[in-house]
Image (cartoon, rainbow, N blue to C red):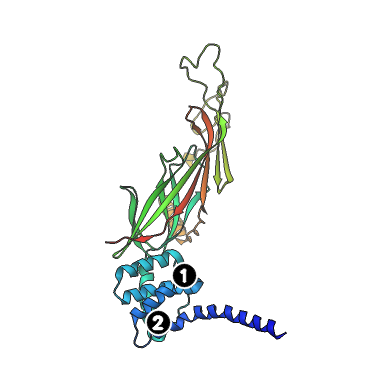
Amino acid sequence: MTRPRTVAALLVLCLAVPAAARSDWRTELNARLGRAPDYRAAWDFLSEEAKRLEGDDRQAAGAILPFLAAKLGEKETERSLVADYFETYKDYDPDFGFLDDYAVRDFFRFWAAWKRSYPLVYDLCLLAYDRSAATGLPGSVDIGLELLNEAFFRVSVGPYILEGGHWPAGFHILTIPLRGLFERSDSYEFVLDLKSADLIIRKPIRLKIDIADVSGPVVAPPPGPTGARDMGVPTRPIREAELSLYIDGKLVLKSRKIAARPSPFTFPLGGPLMAGQKPYMPPPKDSPAAHGVSVLDALALAYQALKDLVRKKPLPPSPPSYQKVSSLSYAYPRTAAEGETVSARASLSLSPGRGTILRE
């Protein structure tokens, strides 16, 4: 009876030793950041220990490492580690209360300066609007994003600059042109550069377009007995068209247009047409020219109308008319390689990359 209990106790002790070793890294770090800090020893210890940490411990180490690099004067390493932290954890911070009093104040001054200046871009998404869809494929797409701090921005594709200016902190909409991109399935990379002080962050934005045929070719009717199609005579115009809009693979809008057909015949309405009088309506009993108002009364009415207009409260802001989605789909007809018209569907998805700091 004693032997199984001894084995179980040893097993529990073996499992507890790694957990204690993982939590002891904080004590080891504080021992190197005391009243007489040794930043080189702290850097050597934490840079190796961070490879074995997980969860909040790994996140806390990821924020302390650039602080140690700054203390050692390694500016490029500091910037690279700060960019890795923000691109991984955004602006969420773990608990730094375990740091010694001699180090925590200096660290918070360092970290607060970075949080006020780093132009972090996050929550990129495609925007789908509730407005009626136009016929054919879209000429552009809107991308929504959140910006942590104000920055100057520039959007480019290859050597061409599409847009630039200044953005305050908050939500912004970026319009990306799509003309000529629906010829085949492919990925296109747009570059977003953000400048804050002497820091430039480059964030790639990749748009992936997948095109697939969803039905066979549309079989054209045989030519008439007179051979009108062979002689170049224009065919009858299309009187009906249908467009479907898919969001995340779900049909959310279907529009059908039917051309108005001209009336086969018209008939005139007889009778006199006098000014201000509809056909076959009795003439007015009173002439509008016989009624009037004095100039003073008109000014008083206008003044009261202006007072009422100024006194009215502004209308509450309307809710956004867009939805944040991960993909957009469009159904449309296209011409295949054989020259036949087929029904196709184009899917548009967004794949943002990690931001990197440009070196001077």
Farthest left residue? 360
Spatial CA span between label 2 and label 1: 18 Å
**On screen, residue 27 above or below 60:** below
N-term-proximal mark, 2 vs 1 = 1
The residue that label 2 is drawn on is 104
Q: Mark 1 points at which residue?
A: 92
Q: Residue at x 36, y 88 (%)?
A: 35
Position of residue 219 in the picture relative to residue 138 (left or right):
right
Does any portion of residue 293 appear in the rendered image? Answer: no
Q: Residue 152 carries which label?
A: none
- Res. 60 in view: yes
Q: Where is residue 326? Give x, y as percent.
A: 51, 52
Side of 198 where 260 appears, left or right: right
Q: Nearer the viewer, residue 192 or 47?
A: 47
Front residue of this view, candidates 124 and 50:
50
Residue drawn at (49%, 43%) of the image: 210
